[in-house]
Amino acid sequence: MRIDKFLWSIRFYKTRTLASEEIKKNRVSIGDAKVKTSKEVKIGDEITIRKNQIDYKIKVLALPKSRIGAKLVPLHIKDITAKEQLDLLKLRQDSQNYYRNRGEGRPTKKDRREMEDYLESGDEVDDWDQFFNTENLDED
């Protein structure tokens, strides 16, 4: 199976085109050798993939016939990525979540208007969480 099709079928890339582009940019290698998109993957190959500034390393256990479900991926590859790389990935994810918790988006238009009205009234806010919680309690 071609390397681009393999990376697409194990859901490492969303499309074959993305997989091919990454291979052309020399971000994928089998062993220590850079590969072309037409390179055939065999069982037992160790593939190194540079994605999001992390070097992932996988070992081929089986070749899928076509794109497989996410639950079946562990049957076809084994993740042998170095622990340092995984720690680096976790550190980057945590640093992105530092400013805003997951699921918290921008204030709604209603929230923004309430903040502007409150600020125009001249009152100072020490605790914004308490401000929003008391506003929501008054509506109920």
Image: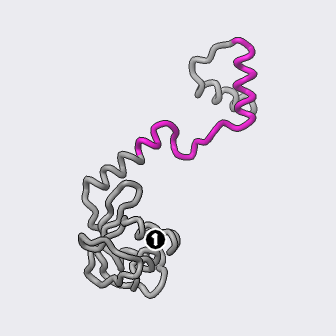
Residue 100 screen position, x and y as percent: 52, 39
Residue 56 screen position, x and y as percent: 33, 63
Residue 103 located within the stretch drawn in magenta: yes
Please indicate whether residue 139 sits to the left or right of residue 82 in the image.
Answer: right
Residue 29 screen position, x and y as percent: 31, 70
Disc 1 marks a residue whose amino acid type is Ala
The image quarter containing residue 109 is top right
Q: Residue at x 45, y 38 (%)?
A: 98
Q: Which residues are magenta?
A: 94-122
Q: Secondary structure at mark 1?
A: helix
Q: Residue at x 32, y 60 (%)?
A: 55
Please indicate whether residue 63 sits to the left or right of residue 82 in the image.
Answer: right
Quick one: which residue is furthest to the bottom in this view? 65
**Quarter containing the C terminus:** top right
**100 in relation to 14, above or below:** above
Q: How is the image coloured?
A: one colour
Residue 83 screen position, x and y as percent: 25, 56
Please indicate whether residue 133 sits to the left or right of residue 120 in the image.
Answer: left
Residue under circle 1? 19
Of 45 and 134, the residue lying toward us: 45
Of 44 and 136, the residue lying toward us: 44
